[in-house]
Amino acid sequence: MTVQAETVDLKPVDAVLEKYGCEASWLVMILQDAQEAYNWLPRPVLERVAERLQVPLSQVYNVATFYASFSLTERGRHVIRVCDGTACHLKGAPWVRDEISRHLGVEEGGTTEDKQFTLETVACLGACALAPVMMIDSTYYGHMTPEKARAVLAPYRKREASDD
């Protein structure tokens, strides 16, 4: 998806840059806060960061693409991460992911048409004792089954419907 600079309000990223004094040593924190403001990192935001920090755009992209937590594509309002580490995989994470995909009508790595959910598979969520585990935004849900995944999603879907 291409985003034109004039369609992106740069005030939030400018506020983030001011918060960190436009210091290049804070690049990772700046990108984290910018992503929180936009829910992803649009190109005009990365360009503004490079310009204001007086660093090459390639340096900003290197950081933004190095860390898996950054997204250069638009994400849904809620990000669902399904762990596929060894413990989770062996305990059924692929079935959980597939059920979420069917239930929301979104492919792994994709975003629902209404921009409410993004489904990602990650290598590890660091909660092996809860395997299989998934996260929605920053909340962990453990011992998942396809049925439990649908139940966990229900309140998020109701919340989204009532926000319309």
Image: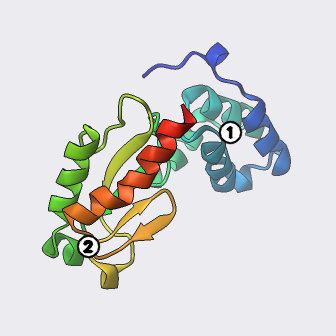
Towards the viewer: 158 or 142: 158
Question: Which label was assigned to residue 137?
Answer: none
User: Looking at the image, which residue is at 30% across and 43% down?
Assistant: 109
Rendered view: 18 above or below 142 = above
Question: Are the residues tagged 1 and 2 within 8 Å (C-beta)?
Answer: no
- Counting labels gives 2
**Residue beneath label 1, please?**
55
User: Taking the image as drawn, is residue 77 in sight?
Assistant: no
Residue 41, horizontal then vertical, whole percent? 55, 37
Indicate left or right for 157 with 13 as reference.
left
Determine which quarter of the picture holds residue 145.
bottom left
Q: CA distance from mark 1 to mark 2?
A: 42 Å
Does any portion of residue 149 appear in the rendered image?
A: yes
Q: Quadrant of the C terminus?
A: top right
User: Residue at 77% across / 44% down in the picture?
Assistant: 16
Which residue appears at 53% of the width and 38% of the height? 162
Q: Residues within 10 Å of mark 1 (few under 14, many from 20)?
A: some
Element at label 1: loop
Which is closer to the viewer, label 1 or label 2?
Answer: 2
Point out residue 91 in the picture as x, y percentages from the top left corner. 16, 75
Quadrant housing the N terminus = top left
Residue drawn at point x = 36 percent, y = 28 percent: 113
Q: Is residue 129 above or below residue 112?
A: below
Q: Which residue is mark 2?
A: 132
The outermost residue toward the bottom is 129
Q: Position of residue 68 (x, y in %)?
A: 43, 54
Kind of residue sitting beneath label 2 = Pro
Q: Observer-nearest residue: 153 or 46?
A: 153
Mark 2 Cα-neighbour bin, 10 Å: few <14, some 14–19, many ≥20: many
Mark positioned earlier in the residue sequence (1 or 2): 1
Q: Amino acid at mark 1?
A: Val
* Secondary structure category for the residue under label 2: loop
